[in-house]
Image (cartoon, rainbow, N blue to C red):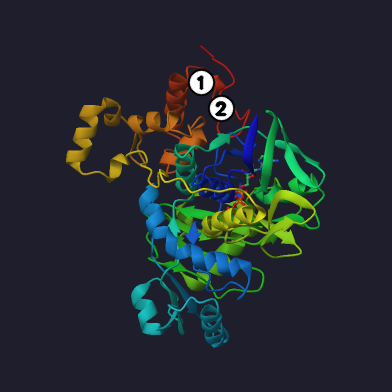
């Protein structure tokens, strides 16, 4: 097999790079060791599209986040991705925090995020009635936004496929071949792929991939972030992203609505060594309760429907790097894509395309590039008339499988046969939210399993929850 460009990793970053490169007359393959697109970190974050107001001024991260934010309105409209500019507030509860506000605003100005504004105590309490009444004043960052992070990656991948790119899932890169200071190709679990250019977008494992070409002059440790997700009916809600005053280590623990109307509370920031430790812990969750209740005293963590954690790829030494090498033609190494990678993925895509062009790759823009993608109809968002019409066209839309989120059999079947097919119970969950509601799949889980087995023409015992061999059924009793 031969390709012009091989992208390693189908998280937000690798997928955004693949989509960007699919705008040009190139053969592009994105290889992903998991069974689905969506990455590791890209499916376990706060789902905020940042403005970059608090980035290090003058850094590459600042440049990429600040330039990415304004692009999301058009991108999400084009690719049918749920997105909302709800804005963030940064309330100061103590005198010490209040004294830090000018410094934060100045930093925002240095990052060219000029729309950050002061808010009075009264304005804040009007915007967020659940806020701690001791609030002294704060800042408003109007373009901080929320997105569906799962559909974001799926939509970009599907659009890249529509434009000729290939995703090879369940394909792990195990080695990279170079000759005379030049990239030749990659050894993978699906065979050797000859490639002129290789982009390392392997997230948490980018140091392992870098070691394959001797460019691991850094290492990555996971920085865990734990979260609570609250029921949509919780009585204490916020309307904006409510952020604490940041510290050096982290943006801090926040509370915000998700794009689908739940409340998200977290994350922690815990430095680890084990890249597979995605557990949630009592200590971590207790620390969220302690910190967030200082901002929102009535937060009802008893309304939790699930908890999860994600691992930020923390680079040592720190900082976002997108490196090319004079002694290794054709290789681009990404590292330190840490807390803002969901946001900056799309600018990283353009940046990498520019680097490849500078290296001499002949890139001719495709005039027939398809910029739009239509997702699966979201039945519960349609009017009664539209729902009736859809059911007449396809009666499977008349069968509600997930009661909590009102997801129909028609949507599930569409996801199974989509350009990037959903083949596990969690892949369905990430695309449609079946199983993400209050009962967490207790009711719809077995039905989704049966639909998957029927559509994929296999046994229910062949269907996995998420990753390879995560079977949910071990055999028939009767
Ligand atoms: C708690 C937390 C909160 C966050 N909040 C936000 C936020 O609100 N906004 C924001 O913008 N960012 C946020 N982030 C950061 C953001 O999620 C990440 O920066 C981003 O998702 C990184 O994407 P990625 O594609 O680099 O990595 P990943 O999503 O981890 O994808 C890398 C992929 O590479 C694959 N891979 C690895 N090695 C190989 C190999 N050898 N062969 C083939 N495939 C391989 C992996 O399987 C994986 O799928 C947060 C992160 C965390 C953990």
Q: Mark 1 points at which residue?
A: 460
Q: SS class of the residue under badge 1?
A: helix
Q: Can residue 253 be seen in this view?
A: no
Q: Residue reaching furthest top?
A: 478
Q: Nearer the viewer, residue 247 or 332?
A: 332
Q: Which of marks 1 and 2 is nearer the N terminus?
A: 1
- Number of dots carrying numbers: 2
Res. 326 image quadrant: bottom right
Res. 475 image quadrant: top right
| Residue 463 % position (x, y) | 54, 25
Q: Which of 421 and 294 is in front in this view?
A: 421
Q: Is residue 187 visible?
A: yes
* Circle 2 crowding by C-alpha within 10 Å: few under 14, some 14–19, many from 20: some
Q: Is the residue at mark 2 in contact range of ligand 1, meaning its CB lies under 8 Å from it?
A: no
Residue 156 is left or right of residue 252, and the answer is: left
**Mark 1 near mark 2, Cβ–Cβ under 8 Å?**
yes
Above or below, 429 against 219 in this view is above
| Residue 4 % position (x, y) | 62, 40
CA gap between label 1 and label 2 equals 8 Å
Q: SS class of the residue under badge 2?
A: loop
| Residue 166 % position (x, y) | 55, 35
* Circle 1 crowding by C-alpha within 10 Å: few under 14, some 14–19, many from 20: many
Q: Which of 60 and 411 is in front in this view?
A: 60
Q: Mark 2 points at which residue?
A: 472
Q: Is the residue at mark 1 in contact range of ligand 1, meaning its CB lies under 8 Å from it?
A: no
Residue 59 is left or right of residue 296, and the answer is: right
| Residue 196 % position (x, y) | 68, 42
Residue in the picture at 48% in, 49% down? 365
Q: Nearer the viewer, residue 55 or 6?
A: 6
Above or below, 377 against 321 in this view is above
Residue in the picture at 57% in, 57% down? 348
Above or below, 378 against 254 in this view is above
């Amino acid at each position: 097999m031969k390709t012009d460009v091989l992208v390693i990793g189908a998280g937000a970053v690798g997928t955004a790079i693949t989509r960007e490169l699919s705008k040009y007359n190139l053969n592009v393959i994105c290889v992903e060791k998991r069974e689905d697109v969506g990455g590791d970190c890209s499916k376990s974050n706060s789902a905020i599209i940042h403005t970059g107001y608090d980035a290090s001024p003058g850094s590459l991260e600042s440049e990429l986040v600040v330039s990415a934010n304004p692009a999301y309105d058009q991108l999400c409209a084009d690719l049918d991705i749920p997105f909302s500019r709800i804005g963030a507030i940064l309330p100061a509860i103590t005198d010490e925090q209040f004294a830090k506000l000018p410094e934060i605003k100045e930093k925002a100005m240095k990052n060219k995020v000029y729309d950050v504004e002061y808010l009075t105590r009264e304005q804040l309490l009007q915007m967020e009635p659940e806020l701690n009444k001791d609030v002294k004043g704060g800042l408003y960052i109007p373009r901080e936004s929320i997105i569906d992070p799962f559909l974001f990656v799926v939509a970009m991948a599907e659009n890249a496929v529509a434009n000729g790119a290939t995703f090879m899932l369940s394909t792990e890169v195990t080695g990279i071949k170079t000759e005379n200071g030049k990239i030749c190709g990659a050894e993978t679990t699906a065979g050797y792929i000859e490639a002129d250019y290789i982009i390392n977008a392997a997230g948490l494992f980018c140091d392992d991939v870098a070691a394959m070409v001797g460019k691991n002059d850094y290492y990555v440790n996971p920085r865990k972030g734990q979260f609570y997700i609250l029921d949509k009916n919780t009585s204490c809600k916020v309307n904006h992203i409510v952020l604490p005053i940041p510290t050096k280590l982290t943006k801090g623990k926040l509370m915000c609505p998700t794009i689908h109307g739940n409340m998200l509370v977290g994350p922690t920031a815990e430095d680890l060594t084990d890249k597979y430790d995605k557990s949630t812990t009592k200590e971590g969750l207790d620390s969220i309760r302690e910190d967030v209740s200082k901002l929102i005293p009535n937060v009802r963590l008893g309304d939790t429907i699930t908890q999860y954690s994600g691992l930020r790829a923390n680079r040592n030494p720190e900082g976002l790097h997108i490196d090319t090498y004079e002694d290794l033609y054709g290789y681009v190494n990404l590292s330190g894509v840490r807390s803002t990678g969901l946001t900056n993925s799309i600018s990283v895509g353009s940046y990498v395309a520019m680097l490849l062009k500078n290296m001499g790759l002949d890139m001719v823009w495709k005039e027939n590039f398809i910029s739009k993608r239509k997702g699966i109809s979201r039945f519960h968002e349609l009017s009664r008339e539209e729902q009736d019409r859809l059911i007449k066209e396809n009666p499977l839309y008349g069968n509600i499988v997930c009661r909590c989120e009102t997801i129909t059999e028609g949507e599930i079947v569409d996801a199974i046969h989509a350009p990037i097919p959903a083949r596990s119970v969690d892949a369905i969950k990430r695309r449609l939210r079946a199983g993400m509601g209050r009962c967490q799949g207790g009711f719809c889980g077995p039905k989704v399993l049966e639909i998957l087995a029927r559509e994929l023409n296999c046994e229910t015992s062949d269907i996995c929850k998420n990753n390879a061999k995560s079977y949910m059924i071990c055999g028939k009793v009767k």
